[in-house]
Amino acid sequence: MDKKISALIIGGLAVLAYYGYHRLSAKQKKAMIEQLKREGKKLYEEYIPARPVTTDKNYG
């Protein structure tokens, strides 16, 4: 029973998020997407650091 309730809650949150996104203007949508991209890049750089630069051809 708890799984059904959890699924309904998650589904309801998804619908609410879609409704909120749908009501945004084009300018607001673009700003939100840009912010999500910046945050994603920040998290990626934090958890997956850049590989060191090397001249070794066999580096993996």
Image (cartoon, rainbow, N blue to C red):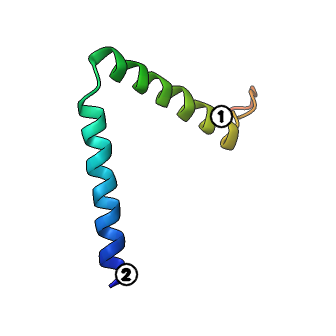
* Residue 3, quarter of picture: bottom left
Q: Percent from the top left, x then y, of residue 29?
A: 34, 23
Left or right placement of residue 41 versus residue 17 in this view: right
| Residue 52 against residue 13 in the figure, above or below | above
| Residue 57 against residue 47 in the figure, above or below | above
Residue at 34% over, 64% down: 9
Mark 2 or mark 1: which is in front?
Answer: 2
* Residue 40, quarter of picture: top right
The tag on residue 2 is 2
Quarter of the figure that contains the C terminus: top right
Q: Which of marks 2 and 1 is nearer the N terminus?
A: 2
Residue at 56% over, 32% down: 39
For disc 2, the neighbor class at 10 Å (few under 14, some 14 to 19, many from 20) is few
* Residue 49, quarter of picture: top right
Residue at 42% over, 19% down: 31
* SS assignment at label 1: helix
Q: Percent from the top left, x then y, of residue 36?
A: 48, 31
Q: Please, what is the three-letter code of the amino acid marked with disc 2? A: Asp
Q: Which residue lies furthest to the top in this view?
A: 27
Q: Please, what is the three-letter code of the amino acid marked with disc 1? A: Glu
Looking at this view, is 31 or 46 the one in front?
31
Q: Count the marks.
A: 2
Q: Mark 1 points at which residue?
A: 45
